[in-house]
Image: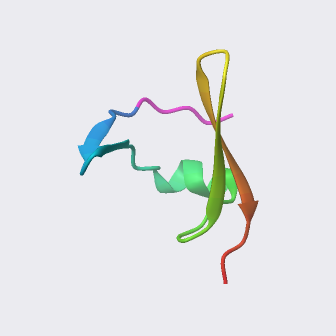
Amino acid sequence: MTEVILVIKQWGNNLGVRLPVGIACEAQVYVDQRVRLTVADGQIIVTPIGVSL
C-alpha cells in the first residue's frame, strides 16, 4: 500500500487534490477515466469504474 499526504486546494467552486503518478499507477487510474466517489464512515473512497475511450 502506497500512502501520501496531500493538501486539498480550491478549484473554482470545488475542492480538489492532484494524484501523484505513483498513486495513479498503483490504483490503475488514467487521464479522463471515470471514477466513483463514495463517503463511508467519514472517509472518501475513489473507485475506478472503467477505462475512458
- Residue 7 image offset from top left, x and y in percent: 32, 33
For the residue pair 16 and 12, the one nearer the viewer reads as: 12
How many numbered discs, if any? 0
Please tell me whether residue 6 is drawn above or below residue 30 in the rendered image: above
Q: Is residue 7 left or right of residue 39?
A: left
Residue extending farthest bottom: 53
Q: Is residue 12 left or right of residue 28?
A: left
Question: Hey, which quadrant is residue 50 in on the image?
Answer: bottom right
> What kind of colouring is applied to the model shown?
rainbow
- Residue 11 image offset from top left, x and y in percent: 27, 49
Q: Is residue 12 left or right of residue 19?
A: left
Question: Hey, which quadrant is residue 46 in on the image?
Answer: top right
Please tell me whether residue 41 is drawn above or below residue 50 in the rendered image: above
- Residue 1 image offset from top left, x and y in percent: 69, 34
- Residue 6 image offset from top left, x and y in percent: 39, 34
Please tell me whether residue 36 is drawn above or below residue 28 in the rendered image: above
Question: Hey, which quadrant is residue 37 in on the image?
Answer: top right
Please tell me whether residue 8 is drawn above or below residue 31 in the rendered image: above
Q: Residue at x 33, y 45 (%)?
A: 14
Residue extending farthest top: 41
Q: Residue at x 25, y 42 (%)?
A: 10
| Residue 31 belongs to the span the image colors magenta | no
For the residue pair 22 and 46, the one nearer the viewer reads as: 46
Q: Main secondary structure of the magenta part?
A: loop
Residue extending farthest right: 50
Q: Is residue 17 left or right of residue 52?
A: left
Q: Residue at x 46, y 50 (%)?
A: 20
Q: Residue at x 27, y 39 (%)?
A: 9
Residue range in magenta is 1-5
Q: If the image is split into quadrants, where does the C terminus sit?
A: bottom right
Residue extending farthest front: 13
